[in-house]
Amino acid sequence: MRTVTGIWHIDRAGRALGTLLILLEELNIQRQIHAVDSVDLLIMGETGELTKDIPLEYDGPHASLARLLLPENGRLPPLLVALRSMSGLSNIFVYLDDDGRGCIESPFGADTVVWPDFEALKLGTHNYDSTRVVQAYHAQCGSIPRLSVTAELLGRAKAFLQASAKGRLPIAVHLKYNANLVGQSNADIDAWRAFVRDCHNAYPVHFVLVGDDASNARFRGMPNVTVACDHDFHIGGHLALIQASPVFMGMMSGPANMALLGENPYLIFKNPDHHAEEMQAELGDHDRYSFASPHQRVLRHWDSEDALHDAFGDLYREIAS
């Protein structure tokens, strides 16, 4: 039976959630192209810290190839928790040799589709931090498969949103904020607090803050806010809340890619001077990706209080009509 195996070369891709989610979407595309039920993932590069103390199951004669045995309980690095949370991923392998070529050519036979192509990785031509593969598939087929967490996590997220919102429209929000990274699409927390405060009486909505950003503490106690971290959600649960929420808002970030590659409306803000050339290459002069559904927008301007009100007011009127 034909299989698809993705290569997550963490030295090339970086160890960021956002690039990992893009890779998983590319694997969903390969799964659709080749009509297979699920995919495997092979982690390559300097994997020591990521896989430390995790039990391994070695693959027969291939001494450098092992399957990760991820425990259901116990501490795992957040990226591995995220992988375990995603639907359609069967096995996670690790290659314990810096030269991965043998792994690609021998353990995986002719029935295995490897993505990205190892030669592309070797030559450095595959960009893990770009949606161009996704855009090209959409241009050819008119649609894309959408990222999803497991059914169990999604069900929990839907129930939590319903209980938190109490009849109001739940909106998942991720406010990327790292005080040590100036000018890298950090949220304007004062603007967001003012916006959320004003929404309390203006709209029948309830905001659920996802992520573990320290700035979430500034929203505790607001009557129309729930902080997901206060309710025992791990990173996979946060991704599930983003997928389950009828609307997502926030800054361009790793978790935001779950919304970007999902099917529900979103408003994602990107500071205009952060990755300006890369964003121009991805979006051109548009405020949405080519594969975006209606009401999915990426706004390359500052997340001021006025900008938040204007963008959300327009979206709410459209989806409520």
Image (cartoon, rainbow, N blue to C red):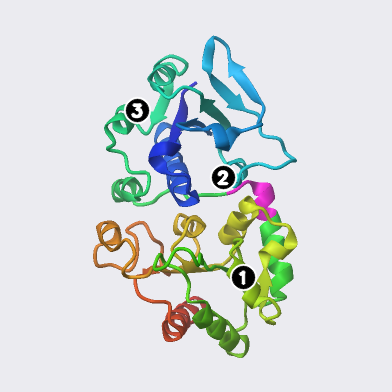
Q: Residue sitting at 56 percent across and 45 percent down? A: 79
Q: CA distance from mark 2 to mark 1?
A: 21 Å
What is the magenta segment's predominant secondary structure?
Answer: helix
Q: Nearer the viewer, residue 297 or 272?
A: 272
Q: Which residue is mark 1?
A: 216
| Residue sitting at x 67%, y 27% | 55
Residue 169 appears in the picture as rendered: no
* CA distance for labels 3 and 2: 22 Å
Q: Left or right: 129 with respect to 257?
A: left
Mark 2 neighbour class, 10 Å CA radius: few under 14, some 14 to 19, many 20 or more:
some
Query: Residue 251: x percent and y percent?
Result: 46, 67
Q: Residue at x 46, y 60 (%)?
A: 253
Q: Which mark is residue 118?
A: 3
Q: Quadrant of residue 224?
A: bottom right
Most extreme residue toward the front is: 180
State the residue lying farthest toward the top: 61
What amino acid type is highlighted by mark number 1?
Asn
Mark closer to the chain start, 2 or 1:
2
> Given the image, on which type of amino acid does mark 3 rest?
Phe
Disc nearer the start of the sequence (3/2)? 2
Marks 3 and 2: CB-CB under 8 Å?
Answer: no
Q: Are marks 2 and 1 in contact (CB under 8 Å)?
A: no
Residue at (59% x, 61% y) in the render: 211
- The quadrant holding residue 268 is bottom left
Residue 66 place in picture, x, y as percent: 57, 22
Residue 101, position in %: x, y? 38, 20
Q: Which residues are magenta?
A: 149-155
Along the horizontal axis of the image, is 141 left or right of 219?
left
Instruction: Label 1: state its secondary structure.
Output: helix
Residue 207 relative to residue 286: left or right:
right
Residue contact at pointers 1 and 3, CB within 8 angstroms: no
Q: Find disc 2 in the rendering and name its residue.
A: 79
